[in-house]
Image (cartoon, rainbow, N blue to C red):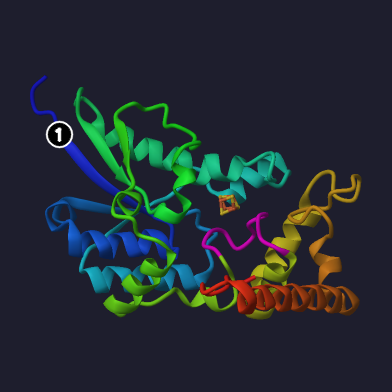
């Protein structure tokens, strides 16, 4: 087949690993970096710190980030379904991330049989097990690469890469563990409280979606968190419980750290 092409794509999440990978590739794989396209699947529900960080990445790398938007946004989908996404019903990921990315690849490869997308993913060497049981792309023209696994880059190395290039971590790491939607159901109760402290208007917005569900209050699971509604979570007695549990856990982790580990503890 004529004109077979290879497109090199790095999908940024707004988190530390994929960001470090972009800087790592600039330094260690300059020829690929030259033709590398940085892509961000914007759910349009990210926290403001993520958008700030993406702008910073563009400046530091002197490269534009292609932002892929969902064809139909969260608000519109929710208004139709009136059911929140959940751990077992992750329609958010499918509609807001997977579909836009697949469409992007489809358009890129349209009428180019035999062309390929080489997708670079920031899975680190210390979590290489994640490369084994990944959901495979149905599009066989996408080939995944894991440079951090290949170069044995671990969590400490990622920290060093970000420090060395001067960009550091996104500001949200001061109060939250991961990138993604402000209402992500994978966040802990402490993360929810931190969202309330840092972005009360977003917390209230997430709370309003719980009320708007058709079956709100009719079943045990109230909404984003499987144990407690957002309205109840911010009652003083519950804040106290969550904060105390968090502090206990932190203490346990830090004791463990002192006794047997030379690694920095994670944020809880
Ligand atoms: S970050 Fe969370 S809420 Fe957003 S798309 Fe991913 S799983 Fe869904």
Q: Which is more toward the observer, 76 or 248?
A: 248
Residue in the picture at 21% in, 25% down? 111
**SS class, disc 1:** loop
Which residues are the magenta region? 178-188
Residue lying furthest top: 1
Residue lying furthest front: 260
Q: Main secondary structure of the magenta part?
A: loop
* Left or right side of 150 for 92: right
Q: Is residue 245 magenta?
A: no
Q: Quadrant of the C terminus?
A: bottom right
Q: Is residue 179 magenta?
A: yes
Res. 41 in view: no
Q: Which is more toward the observer, 9 or 181?
A: 9
Q: Quadrant of the N terminus?
A: top left
Q: Which is more toward the observer, 48 or 16?
A: 16
* Left or right side of 12 for 116: left
**Residue 130 percent location from the top left of the image:** 48, 45
Dividing the picture into quadrants, the one containing residue 225 is bottom right
* Left or right side of 44 for 59: left
Residue density around tag 1, few if under 14, some if 14–19, many if 20 or more, within 10 Å? few
The correct choice, above or below, for 19 with respect to 224 in the image is below
Res. 129 in view: yes
Residue in the picture at 26% in, 73% down? 59
**Residue 158 percent location from the top left of the image:** 38, 67
**Residue 157 percent location from the top left of the image:** 36, 67
**Residue 3 percent location from the top left of the image:** 9, 28
């Amino acid at each position: 087949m004529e004109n077979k092409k290879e497109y090199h794509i790095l999908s940024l999440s707004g988190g530390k690993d994929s960001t470090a990978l972009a800087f790592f590739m600039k330094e260690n794989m300059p020829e690929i970096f030259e033709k590398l396209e940085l892509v961000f699947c914007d759910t349009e529900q990210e926290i403001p710190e993520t958008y700030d960080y993406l702008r910073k990445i563009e400046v530091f790398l002197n490269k534009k980030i292609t932002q892929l938007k969902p064809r139909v946004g969260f608000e519109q989908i929710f208004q139709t379904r009136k059911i929140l996404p959940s751990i077992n019903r992750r329609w958010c990921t499918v509609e807001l991330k997977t579909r836009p990315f697949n469409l992007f690849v489809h358009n890129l490869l349209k009428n180019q049989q035999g062309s390929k997308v080489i997708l670079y993913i920031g899975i680190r060497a210390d979590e290489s097990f994640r490369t084994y049981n990944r959901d495979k792309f149905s599009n066989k023209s996408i080939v995944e690469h894991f440079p951090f696994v290949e170069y044995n880059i671990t969590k400490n190395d990622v920290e060093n890469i970000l420090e060395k290039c001067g960009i550091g971590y996104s500001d949200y790491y001061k109060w939250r563990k991961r990138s993604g939607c402000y209402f992500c159901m994978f966040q802990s109760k402490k993360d929810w409280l931190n969202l309330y402290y840092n972005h009360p208007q977003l917390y209230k917005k997430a709370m309003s979606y719980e009320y708007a569900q058709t079956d709100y209050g009719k079943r045990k699971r109230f909404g984003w968190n499987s144990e407690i509604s957002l309205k109840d979570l911010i009652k003083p007695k519950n804040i106290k419980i969550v904060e105390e549990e968090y502090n206990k856990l932190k203490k346990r982790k830090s004791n463990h750290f002192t006794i047997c580990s030379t690694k920095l503890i994670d944020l809880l």
